[in-house]
Amino acid sequence: MTGGPTSYPWQAWRWDETLFEGAAVYYRRGRKPYAASLAPALAEHLELDGHGRLLDVGCGPGNVALLMAHLLDSVVGLDADAAMVAEAERAAAEEGIANANWVQMRAEELPGSLGTFRIVTFGQSFHWMDRPRVADAVRDMLEPGGAVVQVDLWHGSPPRRESPGGPYPAVPEAAVDELRRRWLGPDRRAGQGFRNTSPDGEDQVFQHAGFAPEQIVVVPDGRVLERSLDDVVAWVLSTSSTAPHLFGDRLGEFVGDLRALLLDASPTGRFSVALSDNRLRIRRPR
């Protein structure tokens, strides 16, 4: 495979339906959880009273929608990946959440026939979309007084450190990325294409669509979690750049190499993972 680290900037990338193919079953187990106080912070800053509807765009297996479901009358999760929608349905049933509905649809097809919402959320998904088009669409889907909220893990916090502060070694992320490069080449895969970078400047995109400047609410976390070897394998397979479909019929070989690498870093198969703070990036129409 050819190309340097900037051969495929985000502008050249085009979405296709294989982006997270095979990753859905690993996502809820593998991804870091949101802060325990995230939902109360959202309720406080948006003055929620238990009523209204929430739309989670790019919902994946429902992590954000299910976390917020008790705050409103109903939530709708939307995702282009059928397997992600199926996982969200399964998770809702498992957690006994009855006020959630799930729609397989691309964000670029909004508004569709979904109606209006008090809150529209994006949980680490907006960067995969045609951002100006989607920002325009969701603005028109907000009820009076409604808001769009990006929910993200603030990667700048906690500061990078050699030890996460727990009893076990940190996940050897640099070694895992080197393994990815050995298997898939230097450029990060994303579906059938490549994407080494992601866009920024989200607030400018939303302001151009008619929103006021964002309000940022930091939701502290600071926990250190114990994660198993299988948890870390699930994390790797939940990402677009190492999604299972990319390895074809050699997925088992890749997982074998990954497990050996992880056991070399922690013979007990346990890892300590420090969680970063979360952010609510709240945007209201002008």
Image (cartoon, rainbow, N blue to C red):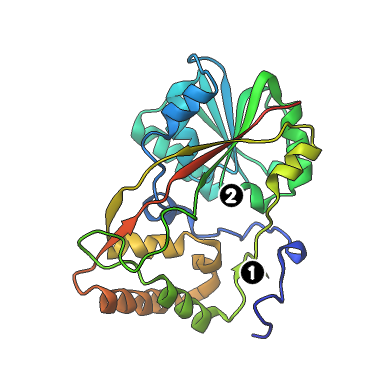
* Residue 81 circle label: 2
Identified by mark 1, the residue type is Asn
Q: Nearer the viewer, residue 104 or 58?
A: 58
Residue 99 visible within the image:
no
Coordinates of residue 279 in the picture (x, y in percent): 51, 41
Residue 82 visible within the image:
yes
SS for tag 1?
loop
Q: Nearer the viewer, residue 260 or 145?
A: 145
Dot 2 alpha-carbon crowd within 10 angstroms: few under 14, some 14 to 19, many 20 or more: many
Of the residues under marks 2 and 1, which one precedes in the sequence?
2
Number of callouts: 2
- Asked if residue 144 is positioned above or below residue 1 in the image, the reply reads above
SS for tag 2?
loop
**Mark 2 or mark 1: which is in front?**
1
- Asked if residue 102 is positioned above or below residue 205 in the image, the reply reads above
Coordinates of residue 253 in the picture (x, y in percent): 40, 79
Q: Dividing the image into 4 quarters, which one contains the N terminus?
A: bottom right
Coordinates of residue 286 in the picture (x, y in percent): 76, 26
Coordinates of residue 245 in the picture (x, y in percent): 53, 67
To which quarter of the image does residue 10 belong?
bottom right
Residue underneath mark 1: 196
- Residue at mark 2 to residue at mark 1: CA–CA distance: 22 Å
Dot 1 alpha-carbon crowd within 10 angstroms: few under 14, some 14 to 19, many 20 or more: some
To which quarter of the image does residue 268 belong?
bottom left
Q: Is residue 259 left or right of residue 88?
A: left
Q: Is residue 67 left or right of residue 1?
A: left
* Residue 284 circle label: none
Q: Nearer the viewer, residue 249 or 171?
A: 171
Q: Is residue 101 left or right of residue 269?
A: right
Q: Residue at x 40, y 39 (%)?
A: 91
